[in-house]
Image: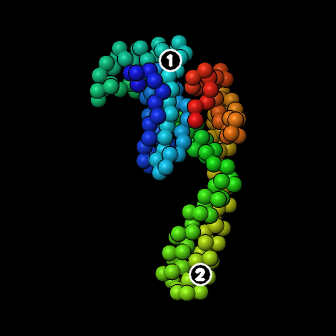
Amino acid sequence: MESGEPLRVTCALPTTTKLARFAAMAQEFGYAYADVRQQGNQCLIVIVPDPGPEARERAARNRAHHPRAAHGGELPRLAPEAVEILKARITFDVGTMCTDRQTILLAGIAVVLPALSLGLLLGSGATAVVLAVVLWAALMALVPVGLAVSRRHRTRYAAVLRAAGFTPVTEPDGRLRYVPPGGRPPGPGGSLVG
């Protein structure tokens, strides 16, 4: 962060709370959360320099009060409400990485191997094929439940973000995102970073 350049950090199996705490700490040192994406089996979080005067002042103050922060020293305390807002943004962004159609396609592909494996374990020949198809269909029947839960989460977090003054913006690829109060997306020149 001392370089002042945008950061792209990958992590395996992070929780939204850990990502939110990371982004909140970055805010304390003059950065802003920009996006979260899937990169292989890891999560990629992007934070960018925040050019606003409040961010610069906060960063200077925290660097003065916590000079050893970059070397494992004491860090500033995080405001719980800032972490919760970032958790809402990250959760919403994770929930909009794929469209419902893409989610169904990915689920269909993802359940082939488990269904085929179970079918082969439980039978042989034509019986294995029938069992694999039945198991695949049974697992695919759960996809609408997952989609409904995902929609409910997106609706809940969208309400939290709107209440905090965030504005919905649709990216050129059709992905819905929420931008901070003031209407400028984080990133160079106010563009969303993907």
- The residue that label 1 is drawn on is 55
Question: Can residue 168 be seen from the camera position used here?
Answer: no
Callout 2: SS: helix
Q: Residue at x 41, y 14 (%)?
A: 61
Question: Can residue 186 be seen from the camera position used here?
Answer: yes
* Amino acid, disc 1: Ala
* Amino acid, disc 2: Val
Place residue 4 in its image quadrant.
top left
Whole-number angstrom distance, CA of label 1 to CA of label 2? 60 Å
Could you tell me residue 9's position as x and y percent? 44, 37
Toward the viewer: 143 or 120? 120
Q: Residue at x 59, y 86 (%)?
A: 126
Crowding at dot 2, Cα within 10 Å, few <14 / some 14-19 / many 20+, comes out as: some
Q: Residue at x 61, y 30 (%)?
A: 192
- Note whether 56 is above or below 25 in the view shown: above
Could you tell me residue 70's position as x and y percent? 33, 25
Could you tell me residue 27's position as x and y percent? 48, 25
Could you say which disc has been placed on residue 129 in the image?
2
Place residue 159 in its image quadrant.
top right
